[in-house]
Amino acid sequence: MIRVNLLPHREEKRKARRTQFYAMSGMVVVLAGLIWLFGFLTIGRWIATQDEKNAFLKREVAVLDKDIAEIKSLKEQTEVMLSRNRVIESLQTTRAETVHLFTELAHQVPDGIYLKSVKQTNRKITLNGYAQANARVSELMQRLDASPLLERPVLIEIKAATVDRRRLSEFQMTAEITLQSATDDKKSEGKPASSRPGAKP
């Protein structure tokens, strides 16, 4: 009977399977390493791209913040300039009104009346003075009511007073400057001197 020793053959098959296993394991490790490297590089590129976008957005936001600050500063400067212009226009209007007011009072105050004070608050003026008789006060009120510059005269108080041993009537009254006259003053300021009423050619 012939006997065949199969141990060397089996040992070679075991070695072959072991070598094949190590080779497959190595290939799996290499493949896993490649996949990890590819994922790492891909994620790194994504992160770098996102960092660039974030940096760009930060730069743009900084530019916008600067522009907003400049716009805010310009708005504040504009408000200051407009406020100054309103004050200047108000002063110019008030100056013209004051001149017209005293001119009108000089024309409308009748003989026998002496004004000791004239006070203006917004559109309202307060007159304090003396009259030789109450009839003079009534005449003054009628003239103020008919004046193109003043309207709605109201007598606040009238009482007897002695000034330099003379019996007089001390009075206080109010009147209002018409809005129409203020508008006419602004229009006349914008016209040449030759086109204003009473101006000489």
Image (cartoon, helix red, strand yellow):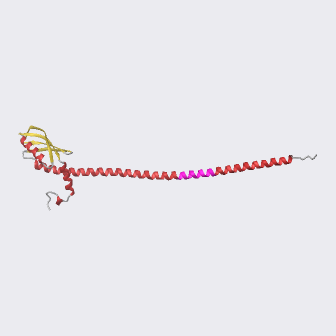
Q: Please tell me whether residue 89 is drawn above or below residue 133 in the rendered image.
A: below
- As drawn, which residue projects farthest toward the right? 1
What percent of the width, then of the height, locates residue 182?
A: 19, 50
What percent of the width, then of the height, locates residue 124?
A: 18, 44
Queried whether the magenta region covers residue 9, the answer comes back as no
- The span shown in magenta is 38-52
Q: Identify which residue is drawn at 70% across, 49% down.
A: 28
- Quarter where residue 141 is shown: top left
Q: How many marks?
A: 0
Please name whichever residue, 119 or 41, is drawn nearer the observer in this view of the structure: 41
Q: Identify which residue is drawn at 60% across, 52% down.
A: 42
Queried whether the magenta region covers residue 39, the answer comes back as yes
Q: Would residue 8 appear left or right of 90 to someone viewing this image?
A: right
Main SS category, magenta section: helix
- As drawn, which residue projects farthest toward the front? 1
Q: Would residue 48 appear left or right of 198 to someone viewing this image?
A: right
Rendered-image quadrant of the C terminus: bottom left
Q: Identify which residue is drawn at 65% across, 50% down.
A: 35
What percent of the width, then of the height, locates residue 134?
A: 7, 40
